[in-house]
Amino acid sequence: MKKLATMIAALAIGGSVHAAPVPAAKQELVNRVLQLWHPESIGESMLQAPVGDAVQQARAVLQGRVSPEKRDAALKEIVADARQFMDENKPLAQASAHKLVGTTVAPMLAERFTEEELRQIITILESPVKKKFEGMVPELQKKLGEGVAADTRAVMDPKLQELQQRIGMRLRSAVSP
């Protein structure tokens, strides 16, 4: 019975029905790699990029166009808006990444790494396997990121647009005489 439950959990976490079944021991190693790697931070990173870009653009627009007092006040408000946006939306992005990691990243790890290689990743040894894993990280991030973007787009895009509009309004009011 325990073996059946483990197999069901491995299938649920491991990916699509069309993928070759992953042995339970290997799936446990994949799960451990994912636990140590914290791929849910990819969702947060994806969110930070456009927010950080918006703040940087605001800083560039304000630089030299307004008095230092107005610039600092506007940037303080913009940074506060960006922080609030991150605080409100980071859990959604992280939850999406956590939800999708089992169907995007886990099957890739199970397919491309042996049980021994997964053990080596877990122990974080200096080895060619570590380089292989690090070389694959951008592809893993891209795959999970695409899933997070598709999963959160309907909710996140309107919020990002609203943030950009608030930043635009603050910039216009700071630049206006």
Image: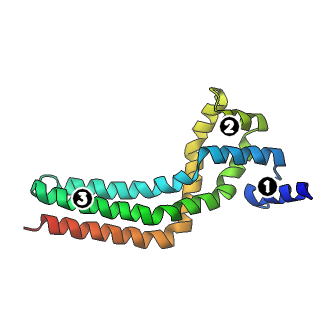
Q: Identify the mark at residue 122; answer none if there is no mark.
A: 2
Q: Which label's residue is closer to the chain start, 3 or 2?
A: 3
User: Looking at the image, which residue is at 32% across and 64% down?
Assistant: 81
- Residue 131 vs residue 69: left or right? right
3 or 1: mark nearer the eye: 3
Instruction: Pick the quarter of the image with the N terminus.
Output: bottom right
The residue labelled by disc 3 is: 76
Report the label total. Answer: 3
| SS for dot 3 | helix
User: Looking at the image, which residue is at 34% across and 68% down?
Assistant: 163
User: Looking at the image, which residue is at 30% across and 71% down?
Assistant: 165
Q: Position of residue 16 (x, y in %)?
A: 75, 60
Instruction: Pick the quarter of the image with the C terminus.
Output: bottom left
Q: Nearer the viewer, residue 98 or 154?
A: 98
Are the two marked residues, 1 and 2, in contact with CB atoms closer than 8 angstroms?
Answer: no
Are the two marked residues, 3 and 1, in contact with CB atoms closer than 8 angstroms?
Answer: no
- Residue 175 vs residue 29: left or right? left
Whether residue 65 is situated above or below residue 37 in the rendered picture? below
> Of the residues shown, which amino acid type is indicated by label 2?
Ile
Q: Identify the mark at residue 10; answer none if there is no mark.
A: 1
- Residue 116 vs residue 69: left or right? right
Q: Position of residue 133 (x, y in %)?
A: 63, 38
Q: Nearer the viewer, residue 105 or 25?
A: 25
